[in-house]
Image: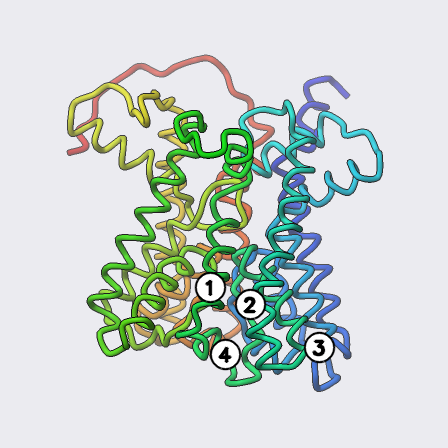
Amino acid sequence: MSPKNKKHNHITSFQIIILGFLSVILLGSLFLMLPFATQDGKGATFSDALFTSTSAVCVTGLVLHDTATYWSIFGQGVILILIQIGGMGIVTIAVAISALSGHKIGLMQRSTMQEAVSAHHVGGIVRLTKFILKTTLIIELTGAVLLLPSFIYDFGIARGLWYSLFHSVSAFCNAGFDLIGVKEPCSSLTTYSSNPLINIVIMALIIIGGIGFLTWDDIKTNKIHFRKYRMQSKVIFIVTGLLIVIPAVYFFFFEYQMLGFKERVLCSIFQTVTTRTAGFNTTDLSAFTETGKMLVIMLMLIGGAPGSTAGGMKTTPIAVLVSTAFSVFRKKNNTHLFKRRVLDDIVKSAATIFLMYVFMFVFGAMIISRIENIPILTTMFETASAIGTVGLSLGITSQLGIASQIILIVLMFFGRVGGLTLIFATVSGVDVNGSMYPQEKITVG
């Protein structure tokens, strides 16, 4: 075999990430099909198990059955493990285990880890992996301890401990799975809409998980010296802040007028935070106006930061595209962020990601609307939730047929591993040459 063919047959980092996610999803499905995984002792069907496993590994939170009342403790434990693996990333878990066991981390593993956490270079990737693992455990355990008082008061010591851990991991991983269905099936956190402790802790976990692992590293290294942060971290903080404040103001004045002031403030902020890939809700989203639902759809599509537990298009591509638009308006040759020039390749990638997400979310919604005869706005809400790995729903998930469920599974997988990862995994063997076609202008506006 020639060296050229060997190069083409070499598995890439992108393919490893794809295969890793697929393997965990299928393994999780098999565990959820076991008789003792469900409370009725019959086990889930393959389609139900596959959908739930995909939703857990892709940290989405869309469910066909209420997690608390349908799955046994074993089934809930499997879901929690899948959430943890999906949130931190299969590659991160694998590299962390290898590093902790004393095995040497090869260049291929380092390169794959670099792609998994969206790091800029391979150097220091093992140190970063250990930091991610340690910080994740500390944050999740802290969140569980803070949630304990409320859950022990409502459910007793044993169940309170389990609920605290489950919801802390689910919130930090931006998964949106909950066990509050014992009060009312598929009610999420609606019974805690006026509880400041539950609201604040869950929101804090969601935000911390959604700002990205590299941002944590910046905080650890540079503390409060914002000017020393990477440009990426600065963009993430600014965009995240704007996407919390602006929608919260809208929700406060236009969607929650009937609530008391304290509950109104909590619900407005919570719904803004959770909408960007977390999937919990403290109010009935079906009661929102169409404008409110459309705003939620937009937030779900944007999502969190790259290299985080969150999904969606990510905050950085949106920032790049907005900055590019301003550069065009001002007739500037380059895109700039925080007095730094953004490479043209990054702008092209951001535009590609945006186009892929919008196309898949709209096209998926159209197909489901046609198949199920459901209003297009309702199906757009569902597909945006799936591709954004959010988990919010207007209550139609369990009513969908197999074909629509498959569409949602594909969207959830696409949203978690990333569109560019899928494309690069597919076209990795394509040769790139230096030839260029003749240039010619085309009018675009």
Label 3 sits on residue: 158
Q: Tell me the SS state at disc 4.
A: loop
Residue 9 image offset from top left, x and y in percent: 70, 30
CB-based contact (under 8 Å), mark 2 and mark 1: yes
Answer yes or no: do the residues labelled 3 and 2 have beta carbons within 8 Å? no
Q: Amino acid at mark 1?
A: Gly
Query: Where does residue 164 sit, x and y in percent of width and height?
Result: 61, 68
Q: CA distance from mark 3 to mark 2?
A: 19 Å
Question: What type is the residue that disc 4 sits on?
Answer: Cys
Q: CA distance from mark 3 to mark 1?
A: 25 Å
- In the depicted view, which residue is nearer to us: 343 or 251? 251
Q: Are marks 3 and 4 in contact (CB under 8 Å)?
A: no
Which residue is the site of mark 2? 177
- In three-dimensional space, the C-alpha distance between marks 3 and 4, rounded to whole angstroms, equals 22 Å
Instruction: Give the numbered dot on residue 279.
Output: 1
Q: Find disc 4 in the rendering and name its residue.
A: 186
Q: Quick one: SS at disc 3?
A: helix
Mark 4 Cα-neighbour bin, 10 Å: few <14, some 14–19, many ≥20: many
Q: CB of mark 3 within 8 Å of CB of mark 1?
A: no
In which image quadrant can residue 37 be found?
bottom right
